[in-house]
Image (cartoon, rainbow, N blue to C red):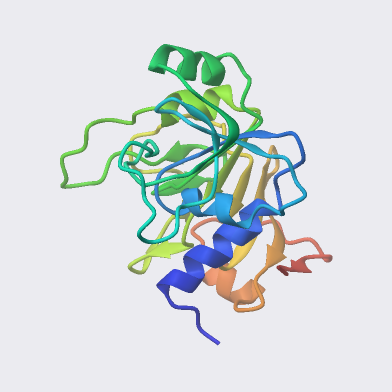
Amino acid sequence: MELDKKQVREYIAKRVAQELKDGFVVNLGIGLPTLVANYVPADMDVVFQSENGIIGVGPAPEAGKEDKDMINAGGGFVTVLPGAQFFDSCTSFGIIRGGHVDATVLGALQVDKEGNLANWMVPGKKVPGMGGAMDLVVGAKEVIVAMEHTSNGQIKILEKCTLPLTAAKEVDLIITEKCVIKVTPEGLVLTEVSPYSSIEDVKANTGVDLIVPEDVKILTL
């Protein structure tokens, strides 16, 4: 079975949600990571923070029920949960830089074996800069990269990033539709493989030698 684009994004978001723990304060990057809020178990208390000044973000609103004044840092519509707070950028980045975010989930253009992250400079395109990602990956206690394993056939997990870095040696975990990879001082460790992939497929689509333990799990949701 091959997943379509929408299923790939949902699959990754569901797996990322399994990494979150009760009581966590979590920042979700723009794009795919925002889907994670839709898959947190109802009995788990996770507080989502948006860097544009909201804490207590809920799932995406139903179609037709969007509030134009309620958006995340990427301009996407959000809901807020009871007890949510709104504040300015100074307070928002005080939370981030002060080490109060337990985990940040963000996409990437490239990640390498040292946990270096490149996620802001798209070759040939004008971009405004790296934005809050630079602060988030340094300030959060855990950095989870949630991304498609490749992009238009281009390998994204490399021996060494070739694009300008957002931050150096800050990534802890990489979750794609093919696998879960843990960043360790010894290198990248393959911990789980998707039932839609295989160890051989993951290796063929990864630009660095992976450490493959004997007990690699099948990624289940």
Q: Is residue 31 above or below residue 90?
A: below
**Whole-percent x and y of residue 124?**
16, 47
- Residue drawn at x 54%, y 46% as measured from the top left: 145
The front one of 87 and 179 is: 87
For residue 184, side relative to residue 59 (left or right): right
**Snapshot quadrant of residue 67:** top left
Is 119 placed left or right of 68 in the picture?
Answer: right
Count all numbered tags in the image, as a single digit. Answer: 0
Task: Give above or below for 125 relative to 54.
Answer: below
- Residue under the image location 22 percent in, 46 percent down: 123
Q: Residue 100, position in %: x, y?
A: 63, 20
For this orientation, the residue located farthest to the right is 215
Say which of 63 and 16 sits in front.
Answer: 63
Instruction: Point out residue 102 in the picture as x, y percentages from the top left corner.
Output: 66, 30
User: Which quarter of the picture shows residue 155?
Assistant: bottom left
Which residue is found at the position 46% from the left and 39% from the top? 117
Quadrant housing residue 221: bottom right
Residue at the spot 45% in from the left edge and 47% down from the top edge: 107
Apparent side of residue 76 relative to residue 22 in the rendered image (left or right)? left
